């Protein structure tokens, strides 16, 4: 936001405090007119102006205009908590049910909105909703117990003002060292800023200082899982269980961590035990389904997802999980039900997004590309508006890799000399799971999963005087070797004893320079797919986390271009060190490509690699069911029925349509 824009907003707020409501509305309309003419105006301005305009209308008792303005605001920013809180005030006098729903939505998107919780408390008391009232009062008690500065910082964090929140939190910690709530809050801010190493240190310290604080332990375990440090997450979960052996949430946390390390039977046993105590736990049914799907038991996984819907028929994750098996087919009756749910006012934003993607898959399977694309586009649009993703920043980050790593900076005698890892990189939905399954069928290769360890090492190098990747060239040989050894040590828990193992984190394509500095003998395979197929397949996929570029056709096309450009650079500075495998060529001539891949990895040919679909192993990616079948080509050209809707993508990839 420019200084001039800040002055305009401040003037509007001053008029509002002086009850010059009409002046606020006129001033807002002037800014909005300019905003719509100049799309370079910041989104923050649009949010602030529409909000102030709505408040001014409500204070003028023009509730209808206030509601209309708020609905426009929410269409742009569907997770803006204060817009829902204001909507609650607008409905208080005329529609208590809508008011309650609006306040509830506000607390979902910003749990620090004490005034919204207090309004809900009044309503729950009046309606004798004892269970909801108890949870509400619990949150009110927690918020009122927080020091004023931490409550303010928590509010700022949930409003997306992360740097301001960090500043307030650090100031508080300067005079209140080791305050547990402040340490946890600063860690959460760090996670949102993707400063994962700092967040991990804070939470580890908090757990050490306050071993009986389960909120801190749970936050630490969740971060470890997010970073792919599942063995450590299991260790934390087991310690939590010692303090609270009967806790439902602790048992669920342990099961989630066990899934992460591939201990599926133990996890499934825990989920089933919890469901035997109480079947009305839809999130546990979905978690059980994920574990069963990773194990290869798709039929039982589908049953688990369907049971989740029985207990919560608007649970979007259950519908998307069914669609994400890639083999499930929705009935016409279920599609009709999902359409009603996705348009229902009571459906939560996250559920709406999940159901939109499921409907897209359902109508695509029904050969109705018009309706399928409408729901894919709606789900992507809603999801993108909850993210703060800037493709231009990502393009610059990939360009920085090219600047940091030149041909002369690589020395095969430096770094850890182990040749164990085989990295499979590329874009999501490019066929990397198939390549992993082929290689994991070899007797000398362990399949693992999408390991986060290279991303973690890159993150640990990011917050220094000279930031990553520009600082890698200055690292000593001793440091490079230690980083390579650290990677091998951290990934050992995922191996089963074979000489080689696979790391199938697609995003590692960004960090090939780092990989080759710390592990010069590692093999790197680039999974490549037809750009239109790859990009559209990514657009149709609702990812668990990350891959923010995939929720816009323009973004995903630009990301693909940046990926290709960076891969060209890696090939030029590391000639012969990367094998590009085209997905379509694998489908056309499996045996030739398998022999080519094995030769590159220095492995002898084994027939089992051709019968990869018979290999039983844990697979947790969306392609898990597809690679448990023999080669088929139905995935090729899936974008073509949607061609008339993909001009935005084709314009970015003009030579590849």
Image: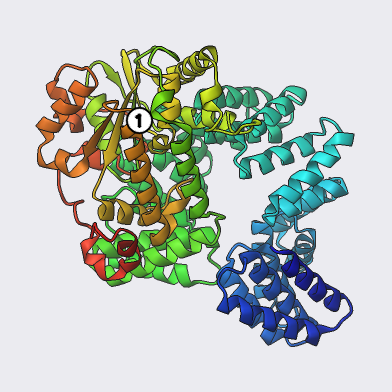
List the residue tagged with mark 1.
573
The relative height of residue 448 versus residue 97 in the rendered view (above or below) is above
**Left or right placement of residue 549 versus residue 66 in this view:** left
The relative height of residue 415 versus residue 366 in the rendered view (above or below) is above
Residue 17, image x and y in percent? Answer: 87, 75
Q: Colour scheme of this structure image?
A: rainbow
How many neighbours does mark 1 have within 10 angstroms: few (below 14), some (14-19), or many (20 or more)? some
Residue found 32% across the figure and 64% down from its top: 651
Quarter of the rendering containing residue 85: bottom right
| Image quarter of the N terminus | bottom right
Quarter of the rendering containing residue 115: bottom right
Residue found 83% across the figure and 77% down from its top: 16
Residue 136, image x and y in percent? Answer: 74, 55
Can the viewer see residue 293 in this picture?
no
| Image quarter of the C terminus | bottom left
- How many marks the image carries: the answer is 1
Name the foreground residue: 17 vs 312. 17
Residue 284, image x and y in percent? Answer: 49, 43
The relative height of residue 247 versus residue 637 in the rendered view (above or below) is above
Residue 648, image x and y in percent? Answer: 35, 66
Query: Mark 1: which secondary structure?
Result: helix
**Left or right placement of residue 417 versus residue 598 in this view:** right
Name the foreground residue: 225 vs 34. 34
Can the viewer see residue 475 in this picture?
yes
**Left or right placement of residue 158 versus residue 596 in this view:** right
Residue found 22% across the figure and 23% down from its top: 600
Quarter of the rendering containing residue 360: bottom left
Name the foreground residue: 592 vs 142. 592
């Amino acid at each position: 936001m420019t200084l001039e824009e800040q002055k305009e907003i401040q003037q509007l707020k001053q008029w509002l405090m002086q009850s010059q409501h009409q002046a606020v509305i006129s001033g807002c309309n002037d800014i909005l007119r300019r905003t719509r003419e100049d799309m370079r105006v910041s989104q923050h301005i649009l949010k602030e102006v529409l909000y102030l305009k709505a408040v001014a209308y409500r204070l003028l008792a023009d509730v209808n205009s206030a509601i209309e303005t708020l609905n426009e605001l929410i269409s742009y920013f569907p997770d803006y908590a204060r817009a829902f809180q204001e909507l609650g005030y607008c409905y208080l006098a005329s529609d208590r049910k809508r008011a309650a729903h609006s306040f509830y939505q506000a607390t979902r998107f910003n749990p620090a909105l004490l005034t919204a919780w207090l309004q809900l408390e009044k309503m729950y008391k009046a309606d004798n909703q004892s269970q909801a009232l108890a949870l509400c009062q619990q949150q009110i008690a927690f918020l009122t117990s927080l020091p004023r500065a931490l409550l303010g910082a928590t509010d700022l964090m949930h409003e997306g003002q992360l740097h301001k929140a960090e500043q307030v939190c650090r100031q508080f910690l300067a005079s209140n060292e080791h305050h547990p709530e402040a340490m946890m809050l600063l860690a959460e801010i760090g996670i949102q800023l993707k400063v994962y190493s700092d967040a991990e240190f804070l939470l580890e310290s908090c757990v050490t200082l306050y071993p009986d604080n389960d909120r801190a332990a749970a936050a630490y375990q969740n971060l470890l899982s997010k970073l792919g440090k599942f063995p450590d997450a299991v260790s934390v979960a087991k310690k939590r269980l010692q303090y609270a052996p009967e806790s439902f949430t602790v048992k669920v946390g342990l099961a989630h961590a066990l899934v992460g390390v591939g201990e599926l039977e133990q996890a499934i046993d825990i989920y089933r035990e919890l469901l035997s105590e109480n079947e009305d736990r839809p999130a546990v049914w979905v978690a059980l389904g994920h574990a069963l799907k990773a194990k290869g038991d798709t039929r039982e996984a589908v049953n688990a997802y369907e049971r989740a819907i029985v207990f919560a028929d608007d649970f979007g994750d259950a519908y998307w999980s069914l669609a994400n098996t890639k083999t499930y087919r929705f009935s016409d009756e279920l599609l009709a039900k999902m359409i009603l749910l996705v348009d229902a006012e009571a459906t939560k934003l996250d559920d709406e997004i999940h159901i939109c993607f499921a409907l897209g898959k359902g109508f695509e399977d029904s050969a109705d590309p018009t309706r399928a694309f409408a729901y894919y586009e709606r789900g992507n649009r809603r999801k993108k508006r909850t993210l703060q993703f800037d493709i231009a920043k990502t393009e610059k980050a990939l360009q920085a890799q090219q600047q940091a790593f030149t041909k002369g900076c690589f020395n095969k005698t430096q770094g850890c000399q182990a040749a164990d890892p085989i990295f499979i990189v590329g874009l999501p939905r490019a066929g990397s799971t198939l390549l992993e399954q082929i290689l994991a069928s070899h007797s000398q290769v362990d399949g693992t999963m999408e390991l986060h360890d290279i991303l973690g090492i890159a993150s640990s190098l990011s917050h220094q005087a000279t930031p990553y990747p520009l600082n890698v060239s200055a690292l000593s040989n001793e440091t490079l070797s230690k980083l390579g050894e650290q990677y091998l040590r951290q990934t050992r828990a995922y191996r089963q004893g074979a000489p080689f193992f696979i790391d199938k984190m697609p995003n590692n394509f960004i960090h090939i320079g780092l990989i080759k500095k710390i592990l010069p003998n590692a093999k790197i395979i680039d999974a490549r797919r037809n750009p239109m197929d790859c990009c559209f397949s990514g657009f149709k996929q609702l990812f668990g986390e990350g891959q923010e570029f995939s929720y816009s056709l323009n973004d995903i096309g630009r990301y693909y271009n940046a990926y290709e450009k960076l891969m060209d650079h890696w090939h030029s500075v590391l000639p012969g060190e990367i094998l590009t495998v085209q997905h379509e060529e694998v489908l056309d001539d499996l045996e030739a490509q398998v022999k080519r891949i094995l030769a590159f990895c220095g492995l002898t040919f084994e027939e089992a690699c051709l019968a990869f679909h018979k290999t039983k192993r844990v697979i947790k990616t969306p392609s898990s069911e597809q690679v448990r079948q023999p080669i088929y080509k139905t995935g090729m050209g899936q974008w073509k029925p949607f061609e008339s809707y993909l001009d935005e993508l084709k314009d970015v990839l003009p030579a590849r349509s």
